[in-house]
Amino acid sequence: MSDQYVVTLACPDRPGIVHAVAGFLVDLGGNILESQQHDDLAEHRFFMRVRFDAPGTDLDGLRAAFTPVAERFDMAWELWDAAAPYRTLILVSKFAHCLNDLLFRWSNQHLQIDAVGVVSNHPDLEPMAASYGVPFHHVPVTPDTKPEAEARLLGLVDELDVDLVVLARYMQVLSNDTCRQLEGKAINIHHSFLPSFKGARPYHQAFDRGVKLVGATAHYVTADLDEGPIIEQDVMRVDHRYDASELAAAGRDVESQVLSRAVRWHTESRVIVNGHKTVVFR
């Protein structure tokens, strides 16, 4: 625990919100270190993120003290220790690039996570997880065993007290019920060719069509497949000199970077869901 905290909030837009938050911190003896806000004029919604220090306080006490302010303005809000790592469970199949990137950044303390486990429907990446000292859970999935596999996954989420689930190229579609249970705390990554190139070998399909941009999208997991609120996207330009394998390699680079940024922003409390969209205080 530290003396620095982050509060994020979303509420109907009206006068006095910033004054109320600042007044709360003044009364607390706190000091604002970083403050960002956004007005969604179309929806008349207000969003804010404040990082502050408050020596001599504790998280539970802060949450209790802020509750009357939140209730007065009908806020959806969260308040966290700014330095607390998110206990993170990473799901993966056979593609290793995103998993390796996340574990490398975590091992170098470049992500505010605690990698508490890796879950895979294949055993292939167990040596990689072991090389970082992260427990590996092989949970096979077949059409007949899918309910049991998802029950095991949700059991691990509970057992390991998981704050965040990251689908790092996990090539299984989660059921609607599982998506609902993980709502707001599961992030997925996929190439940005959708809906043009579906199914297997999308980069080879893109190569056959001569695409000129390779991209990736990181979003929150919802029951609407690959249509959850987008956190981050990026692209890189390619041309006729790229063969299919080079195109796929470029795609893996973009996927890794986009996913790591999405995870970093989420764990730094920089992302607030706004309906089907997000507000990201970068």
Image: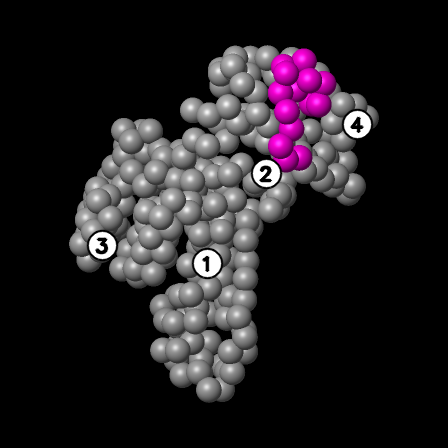
Residues 158 and 266: in front is: 266
Q: Which residue lies at the image location 42% right of the left edge and 45% below the top edge?
A: 111
**Which mark lies nearer to you, 4 or 3?**
3
**Which mark lies nearer to you, 3 or 2?**
3
Mark 2 closeness class: few <14, some 14–19, many ≥20 residues within 10 Å: many
Q: In the image, is 271 to the left or to the right of 198? A: right
Which amino acid does the dot numbered 3 rest on? Met
Mark 1 closeness class: few <14, some 14–19, many ≥20 residues within 10 Å: some
Estimate the x, y position of residue 245 in percent, counting from the top left. Answer: 36, 78
Q: Which residue lies at the image location 32% right of the left edge and 34% below the top edge?
A: 157
Q: Which residue is mark 1?
A: 257
Number of the label disc, if any, that sits on residue 128: 3
Q: In the image, is 222 to the left or to the right of 138? A: right
* C-alpha span from label 3 to label 1: 19 Å
| Viewer can see residue 43 | no
* C-alpha span from label 1 to label 4: 37 Å
Mark 4 closeness class: few <14, some 14–19, many ≥20 residues within 10 Å: few
Q: Which residue is mark 2?
A: 272
Task: Say if mark 3 contacts mark 2, CB within 8 Å.
Answer: no
Estimate the x, y position of residue 216 in percent, counting from the top left. Answer: 49, 61
Q: Which residue is mark 4?
A: 14
Considering the numbered disc 4 on the image, is that residue within a helix, a strand or a loop? loop
Which amino acid does the dot numbered 1 rest on? Gln
Which amino acid does the dot numbered 4 rest on? Arg
Considering the numbered disc 1 on the image, is that residue within a helix, a strand or a loop? helix
Which amino acid does the dot numbered 2 rest on? Ile
Going from the N terminus, do you reach mark 4 or mark 2 first? 4
In the rendered view of the protein, which quadrant contains the N terminus? top left
What's the magenta region?
A: 21-35
